[in-house]
Image: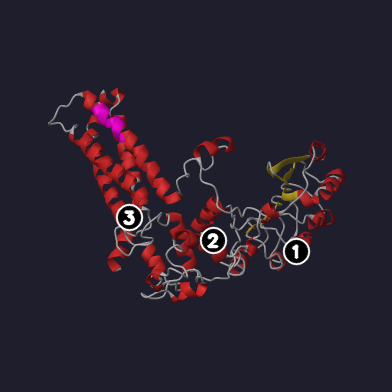
Amino acid sequence: MISLDLATFFGRFHPLLVHLPIGFILLALLYDLKWFQKNKQYYNVYSITWFLAFISAAISAFMGWLLAQNGYYIEADLKPHQVSGILLVLFSGLGWFIRLRNFSFPSTIKKINNFTILGLLILVGHLGGSLTHGPYYLYEHVPESLKLKFKSQEIVVDFENVSLDSITVFKDIIEPILTTKCIACHNNDLNSGGLDMTSIEGLTKGGQSGAGIIGANLDKSLIFERITRSQNDTKFMPPSGVPFTYQEIQLMEWWIEEGSSYSQTLAEINSKSSIQKLLLSYYGMDIREKPWVEKVSLSPLSETDYETLENANFAWRNLSKDNPLLDLKYDGKKLTKKSLATLVMYAPYITWLNLSSCDFTSRELNILSEMENLTRLNLQKSNVKTIDLKGLVSLTHLEILNLHSTQVNKEIFQILKEIPSLKRVFLWNTKIPLKAVEENKTTFPFLE
């Protein structure tokens, strides 16, 4: 187990190291252009670049071999990547050899070697990306009209519009994988090795060799141990049929590490970023924590509405083509009655508001409390005072507040305490003593 852990530890440097041979090989190929050959200063590093390409490719391939020992990859998918990687090392070595000063090889051989290396480089990269990210990673985001020509795999279950509270991790994600790969040999009628995987009790109890699944303990969970063995091992599972994919092993690992609960929902379980991407790609489950602006649902604005904003001296833009929330900037020096009325009219739509370098009264600033979806507020270089900002405490989604070069004093900290959603506050060049800022850094670590 220790040797496997060490192999995995060093093997995980493989994705990092593969960028070295890519860079050296491309640089070496450039040196073969006629423009470079005419410059003697470049020729001095010609051979050494090919040597570095060869050595870095060999080291990267060795690290990849170590990584493959963890059993996470299907042998049929892994083999082409390994073979093409070894060929890339050999042809890189050949590229270095035929360019040594002691030898003189025809330019045709060099060109054939170059095109072969370039093709292998593309092939190895694509196969490696497919191993880690899935077979459709390269064209995952092509236009829908083209995607069907590349992608034949369908998402087994579409959870795109299903609440995360209603998706049970085991029942909806893990159990279907086990059913596909394991139940044929581990059921009520044919419980190979004494293991029945048709029930939660059977999974927990395990078979003749011990417990099948032990929460938060990968090493002692025999089911996980067997599906990640070398596929040449006699105890590798499943012994026939399609092995667990890299993505399925990732999901099993995540579920076990998080306690292997049989009742937890997606909303209740911790999910690292790699799992979030995997669930989104394969199941249509978007479990990423969304900012407030993505949760707001408002009817679209019309061209007339945008003309009204422009006539009131506001520069505007939508956060995205599918989101009508507004980012507004006032282009005047003083808020007029017309501009104030416009702000009130579109208050629910305003999420970013820039009133910098503008003069206004406390009464005029009271309209901010009506902007229920306001997340960013810029008041820098204005005449605003602390007393003018008491209405901000009703803004439950305000995240960024810019008050630099204003008249606010240390009393502002009493107001900030009542706005828990804040993530960044800018207070440079205000009437707040530096000592007061330092004293409040613990309570307000987001102060700038």
Marks 1 & 3, CB-CB < 8 Å contact: no
The circle on residue 393 is 1
Give the residue drawn at x 59%, y 55%: 285
Give the residue drawn at x 29%, y 26%: 36
Name the image colouring.
Answer: secondary structure
First reached walking from the N terminus: tag 2 or tag 1: 2
Asked whether 416 falls inside the magenta stretch, the response is: no
Tell me if residue 8 comes above or below residue 335 in the rendering: below
Give the residue drawn at x 43%, y 55%: 245
Question: Measured from the top left, where is residue 393 in percent x and y?
Answer: 75, 64
Residue type (three-letter) at the residue carrying disc 3: Ala
- All told, the count of numbered labels is 3
The stretch in magenta equals 110-117
Residue, disc 2: 173
Instruction: Quadrant for the N terminus, please.
Output: bottom left
First reached walking from the N terminus: tag 3 or tag 2: 3
First reached walking from the N terminus: tag 1 or tag 3: 3
Q: Residue furthest left?
A: 102
Q: Residues within 10 Å of mark 2 (few under 14, many from 20)?
A: some
> Which one is in front in this view, the residue at disc 2 or the one at disc 1?
2
Judging depth in this view, the residue of 287 and 105 nearest the camera is 287
Residue, disc 3: 68
Quadrant in the picture for residue 209: bottom left
